[in-house]
Image (cartoon, rainbow, N blue to C red):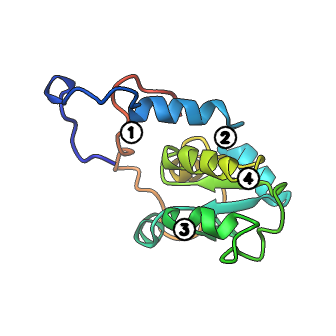
Amino acid sequence: MPLHTIPTESCPAPPPGSRGIDEILAEARTRLRRLDPEQAHLAHRGGALMVDIRPAAQRAAHGTVPGARAIERNVLEWRLDPRCPARLTEAVDYDLPVLVICQEGYTSSLAAAALQDIGLHRATDVVGGFVAWRLAGLPALGPALSHRTPPLAPPVTAGRTPH
């Protein structure tokens, strides 16, 4: 996530055929049946695999969802692809319902679309991520959100799509 915003007029012309992150995120989300935190909680309680893709430091700083499997983004596809020797024991077939959660619901959309690309057709993500989960008052372990600290600005600035 960028720490500051660069004015678009100072950006170089994109190469022909390339897509910006706003377009990539919007396309990924067209393939997902995203769940709000309450729906995700019910699905998780009903047996869906909740996967927290946040780095360990972020989970330690903000908390976790009880029962969620921590799989950092850089190894996600290898751990959940049923045909991969490095898969987790839970990755037994392509019908596995997977709920991906990140901090604010952006990276999780891209990750869930990548899981669909490897055949996990029931993969989706949590709208608003862990921040929305906590704000909804759902079960969480670890540090509580500070009411004095506003949520982080979304990483998408131009042509923003709703999370």
Dots 3 and 4: beta carbons under 8 Å?
no
Asked whether, in this view, residue 55 is left or right of residue 109, the answer is left
Asked whether, in this view, residue 70 is left or right of residue 57, the answer is right
Position of 132 relative to 23 (above/below) = below
Residue drawn at x 69%, y 65% as measured from the top left: 80
Whichever of callouts 4 and 2 sits on the residue coming sooner in the sequence is 2
Query: Badge 3: few (under 14), some or many (20 or more) residues near its Cα, within 10 Å?
Result: few
- Give the distance between the C-alpha atoms of the residues marked 3 and 4, in whole angstroms: 24 Å
> On the image, numbered disc 1 is attached to which residue?
154
The total number of labels drawn is 4
Mark linked to residue 75 = 3
Dots 4 and 2: beta carbons under 8 Å?
no
Eye-nearest disc, 3 or 2 = 3
Mark linked to residue 41 = 4
Dots 3 and 2: beta carbons under 8 Å?
no
Whichever of callouts 3 and 4 sits on the residue coming sooner in the sequence is 4
- Give the distance between the C-alpha atoms of the residues marked 3 and 1, in whole angstroms: 24 Å
- Give the distance between the C-alpha atoms of the residues marked 1 and 2, in whole angstroms: 17 Å
